[in-house]
Amino acid sequence: MSSVVTFFFPAYNLEAMPVSPARAAAFDILLRVERESSYASDLLHSFAHKRLSTPDHALATELVMGVLRWRSRLDADIATASSQPLSKLDTEILIALRLALYQFLWLDRVPQRAALHESVELVKRARKRSAAAFVNAVLRKLSAAPQSREISAEDEISSPEVLAHTLAHPLWLVERWAHEYGLSAAHQICKHNQSVPTTAIRLRAPTAEQQLHQEGVTLTPGGLLASARRVQAGDITKTQAFRTGQIVIQDEASQLVAALVGHGSHILDCCAAPGGKTLAIADRNPEAAITAVELHSHRARLLQKLLHPHASRIQIVTADAQHLPVSRQFDRVLADVPCSGTGTLSRNPEIKWRLTVDDLAELPLRQIAILRSSLAQVAPGGRLIYSTCSLEKEENENVVEQALSENDSFRLLDCRSALDRLKTTGELTWPDTASLTRGPYLRTIPGIHPCDGFFAAILEKS
């Protein structure tokens, strides 16, 4: 369960109170998420919101992510107080209602009258002034008898239906996870998705940890890897170590996938942006020539900026990984393909409301095309690592098995052997190596492992 976040506000003159910068930013971001299929985390860190003060940015983040995590629970409560079906409400009105109700239920120190008043003002600001009285009436009903956010421990795991309702997930996703991993694991996944994710970093310089300590950042050891740390307190993005690239923010499962790539002299990263894995591979292979491919030119430019210190040995190519424009073969290839992202819902909660069953039929078509193209670039004796941040079998095992059925020059290696080697060298610190695998594959599960949900397979060319 998401913990209650405490914010302190001065006394307000409600008749004259303007909309706070944090709530205005949250409203604008949620509107773009709905209308443009944008990602909230990208918008929160965009230039448009850089001028928010640290407290305002923290509140805006809490509001945006909280509303997205608990959307179905909020909507169910709003529906009980609304005289209109929610499907008939303008998006601006529904977002204003969600914002206020989230504050009623989850932000104990925010006065309900302030949350109510500002949501009414947000509707006026969005040029929906005629709906202000409606919003006011709905929120007054909800504030008089707010729904409890408490959830019975017994109810949480009694069925996929109860789990989907109480922990605010689409039923079809919960049913899939319960079928694939068991109801208990589905429960852990959903609980994790409703919590604020831990910020993990990778140390790139031996002095970085001490420098962060001097700048007021408190770290704890990583859960999986010796090179990882978890941020307990402090703003890592404001530190000199972050600005100078001595550390990078990267989930530990993502770090582990990069470690599985191992060592080579010529390495290809087929879907490189935003570049965290590319950089980790470069750090592990300081003498290697690396080719990083990215489809979109604007993301390729961001990749160039991140990898600039290594630019002399990393060639960045803007191209479609389904048709790789490379003329040589590589001894190590990473195909970290675009996917549904269902292993990252604590960081990207909007995905669960956006994803459809049809997407899980369409995504594998692109994934298998990228894998076919990538396999053609592997030198004899070389290895390809296929990975996603998805929990769905269609994007993972099924894609790998189809590729292997089409190409008998590759064999599937057991990831446990690679993990055991990382354990022997001291790089992998997770005590139960076997729990990180499912058959021959790497499989991390949010809520069970201290990281996002990732899948990886290692294919070796004969």
Image (cartoon, rainbow, N blue to C red):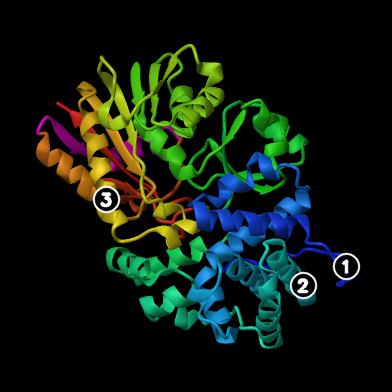
User: Which amino acid type is shown beneath numbered disc 3?
Assistant: Glu
Q: Horizontal placement of 282 versus 244: left or right?
A: left
Residue 370 appears in the rendering:
yes
Q: Horizontal placement of 274 versus 396: left or right?
A: right
**Alpha-carbon distance for marks 2 and 1?**
10 Å
Location of residue 328 with respect to 258 vertically, above or below: above
The secondary element bearing badge 3 is classed as helix
* Quarter assignment of residue 289: top left
The secondary element bearing badge 1 is classed as loop
Q: Where the C terminus falls, by quadrant? A: top left
Q: Which residue is mark 2?
A: 117
- Magenta stretch encompasses residue 424: yes
Closest to the observer, 37 or 53: 37
Residue 250: x and y in percent read: 53, 40
Task: Give me the residue at 29% from left, 55% from top.
Answer: 360
Mark 2 and mark 1 lie on one chain; the one further toward the N terminus is 1
Closest to the observer, 294 or 344: 294
Contact check, label 2 and label 3, Cβ < 8 Å: no
Closest to the observer, 454 or 433: 454
Residue 69: x and y in percent read: 54, 64
Residue 453: x and y in percent read: 41, 52
Q: Where the N terminus falls, by quadrant? A: bottom right
Task: Give me the residue at 72% from left, 71% from top.
Answer: 120
Mark 2 and mark 3 lie on one chain; the one further toward the N terminus is 2
Q: Which residue is mark 3?
A: 362
Residues in magenta, as a range: 408-426
Q: Which residue is mark 1?
A: 16
The label nearer to you, 2 versus 3, is 2
User: Which amino acid type is shown beneath numbered disc 1?
Assistant: Ala
User: Which amino acid type is shown beneath numbered disc 2?
Assistant: His
Residue 309: x and y in percent read: 56, 17
